[in-house]
Structures are given as C-alpha cells and as structure tokens.
Image: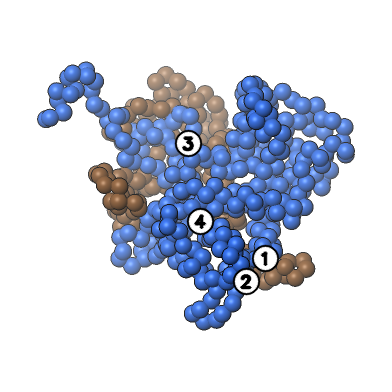
Chain colours: A blue, B brown
Amino acid sequence: MPRLPLQQTTGKKISSQDAPQNQWVMITEEKIFDNYGNDMDNISMHKLRHPKTDKATFYLISNGGQQISEIMKFESSCGSWLIGDSVQKDGSILMTTPVDPLFLVLPYLINAAKSGKYMTVDQIVHDEEFPDVSNLLACLDFDSLDYVADMKGAGDFKAYRYNSEKTLSWLRLKTDNVLEALRSSGVDMNESGAQSALFIRSKKTSSGDENGYLKYACGLVSDYIPLELVTSLKDYLGITEAVEDRSPVEPPNKKVKLSENQGTVTPTEDYSRFFGQDSKKQTSAAGGRQTAAQKKLSKVDVRGMKSISSFFSSKS
Amino acid sequence: MAVCIDAASFRNTGETTCHHLPCTINANGKANVADFFETAIRIENEGLTSSFRGRPLHGQEVTLPEGFIGVVLKEKGEAVIEEEVRQLHVQHRFLKFTAWNLDKIPNADDRLNKALRWISIARALHRPVDLESSQQSVSGK
C-alpha cells in the first residue's frame, strides 16, 4: 500500500487508463502460428534498418526464422475495440505482411559496393547499430542475390558485388507484379482517378491510364528502396513527370480548390486517396501558410508516387 | 531488445467476437458487451445498425482475407530492463469483425477495408520474382 498516500495527495485516482498499453490487435498470416519445432520463441520482432528511411523499424520473423514480415500500424483519429466481454481503448490494428528480404539487404549491398570489391554476404550484411540483422540472413534465399548482384566463387565461398543494371531490371519485374495486382484488384487507377482531387476530369487517353498505374506501382515499390535508387528506377521505367507530361497535350485543367474536407471532392471509389492521404495532406496544408521551403516542396510532383507507408504512419 | 510472441498460446484460444467502434472509449478491461451493446444490433436492408451512447451506428462485417487471422496480443508483466525479452501472448483470435461507422453506411471505401486490400498488393510486391524473366530483361527485353 505504499502508493496510497500519493493518490490522496494528488487527488487523482490511478485507473487502468493511465497504465501503459499492454494489449494489441494484430492481423497476421495464420501460418506464422504453425508449429515449427518446440521452440516457443519462433515468432519474434526485431529492429532492423528500413531500406527506404534508414530508420529503426520492427520486423516480424517467423516460421522457423525463415520468413520476415513488415508490421504496419493502422489507426484512425478515434476508435476502440470491443473484444469478447472487454474494452480495449486503443483502436489501432497492427498488420503484418511478408516482405522480400532482398529489399532489406539491398542497402547493405549498395553500401558495400562503394569499395568496388566482391565480399561475402556476412561481410556485406553487417551492422553494429542493428545486430539483429543476422536474423535477416536466415530469411534470405542466397540464390536471389543473383537478381541484384554479380557473384564470384562457388560452393561455400561465394562473394557478391552490387549490380545496378540487374537491380533495376529486378525492380521492373517487381513493378510489373504490382501493376498486375492493382489491375486485378479493380483499383481505379487511371490518371483522373489518381488526381481527381486536384483536377476536373477531362478527356483522357488510354496511355494516360497506363502511366497512372505505372506511376502508382512504381511509388509502392519505391517505398522499399533507397531514395537514390528511386530516381534511377523512374528513369528506367520511363516515368515522366505528370506536370510536364500533360500540359502540352491538354488545355490547362481547371484546378479544383482543395477543401478542408477532401471527401467532398474525391469520388467514393478513389482508392488512391487512401494510400495517398499523407501526400495530399501536404498539398492542402501548403495552400494555407507556406514557408519558402514548403513552397518549393509543394512543387515536387508526388501525385504519381503515393506512399503507402505514409498512410500507415509510424511503423512500430 | 526483442519482442517474442508465444506461438503455443495461440492454440489455447477460441474465436472471439470483435467490434471496432468509431469512438475512443477511455478504458481497458471488462465490459458487458453482450448485454449492453450486442443487444442493440439490428439487421436492416443496408446492413447492421446499432447505437452507442445514443449515437446511431452503421456496421459491416469484415472477413479477413484468406490465410490471415486476427489476434489479440497481451503483454504479461513489463520488461523492466531494456535488454529483457518482452513476451506477448495470444489472448483471442478472430476471422471476422464488425466495423462500425458513426451515422454513415459502411462501404468498400472505408479505411479498414482499404487496409485489408493492401494485403493482395503486398503479396505481389514481395513474392520472389521469376529468375528467367529477370535475366531476359537484362539481356535486352
């Protein structure tokens, strides 16, 4: 009972709402709970370097240490869960989806190539700041390094060196796969769909639609690669900036004023609005008070490069 | 500092009814959901309706994509030392939940639904690419 006097003096009851959160709702692949031996610790979360942001990010490693998934946090401004016969104040959802470990290895490969030497994987993927990176190697199919690197040696001793040409063609295949998924999921991703929050619909060509899809797919892939590679990938895929692209072809579109409530401008089926929320928010915020730097930023065309991670906010 | 999920605890859980409410309830713990919330649920033409504290709610049952499952993870005890491994246990599981909107008919545009749609796109993005087609495109498309 040593706490009691404290409660009385502050006059504040210490209730459950003041306690740190100790319960979370997570949506994950069912197979991570499959029995892989008797090791109770076969599902674990580790801090690794995010390939795009370079920041510490939690990843989930499961299935006998062979599968790595990213963890996204999905939350709205308000919300709570009712779970069985209980209430959980935190209304967020953690969602895990498998991630290609090659994306996480890529920054290390690029970095190691600066020496120009061939190195073994252990030498390349070494990070004093993130010792858990050793867990990443167990998830990696070493043969897949062939997509992004040149290899020397044989058998147990193989050394690798980053190959940018190979990497870009690998990223092109990734983009193609995303394109296919976007199309088959029925996402309305033509230029007007992607940009209807900003422009009134006018005549669109089918090539314009293609470009919209491609830019969107490229944007999703770009969330997993270092920034300097994004520029090369856009060039490689022949993605043109929308602003330069459209003005000679069409008469200037009338710009719709972005209202505070974007829902009134965007169509109900606009899938892009969801993923692109953050980038749009920046645009609308820029409409108000702007510093010189913000103005400069707002000129950067990000419309085709919707970032999914921005929507899910911080990865924890 | 690592965080571990006790996979064995999953086997001892059953499916639980879950509701996602469009408001923050400033509490954690037991609540008589069955008597005071679920009794108010009605099935109408446009879907489910209910009310919470007198506010009209519109609900939609959301089934998780194939191969996915929802779990409620609970941390027992607190890691006192930074280096200590934190243990999470599976308390509940669910394959579907009810998402409630305040006074708005749920549709495919709802943010929760859209988050789930990311799963199929993520699958396409992260599955290994085909090696042969990769080499083809290197050697001249």
Residue located beneath label 4 in the image: A98
Q: How far is the residue under mark 3 from the one under mark 2?
A: 42 Å
Question: Residue A69, relative to residue A112: is it above or below?
Answer: above
The residue tagged with tag 3: helix, strand or loop? Answer: loop
Q: Which residue is mark 3?
A: A75
Contact between labelled residues 3 and 4, with CB atoms less than 8 Å apart: no
Rendering coords of residue A300 (x, y %): 70, 37
Same chain, marks 4 and 3? yes
Amino acid at circle 2: Asp
User: Which element is circle 2 on?
Assistant: strand
Give the spatial CA distance, label 4 vs label 2: 26 Å
Residue A308 appears at what percent x and percent y?
58, 43
Residue displayed at 63% across by 35% down: A279
Mark 3 surroundings within 10 Å by alpha-carbon count, few (fewer than 14), some (14 through 19), many (20 or more): some
**What residue type is disc 3 on?**
Glu
Badge 1 sits on which subunit? A
Say which of marks 2 and 1 sits in front. 2
Q: Which residue is mark 1?
A: A166
Residue B9's tag is: none
Residue type for callout 1: Lys
What residue sits 75% from the left and 70% below the top?
Answer: B139
Q: Give the side of residue A253 with respect to residue A55, left or right.
A: right
Q: Is residue A188 among the parts visible in the rendering?
A: no
Which residue has dot 2 on it? A150
First in residue order: circle 4 vs circle 2: 4
Where disc 4 sits, the SS reads strand
* Mark closest to the chain's N terminus, 1 or 3: 3
Mark 1 and mark 4 residues within 8 Å of each other at the beta carbon: no
**Residue A199 coordinates in the image, percent (x, y):** 76, 31
Q: Chain of mark 2?
A: A
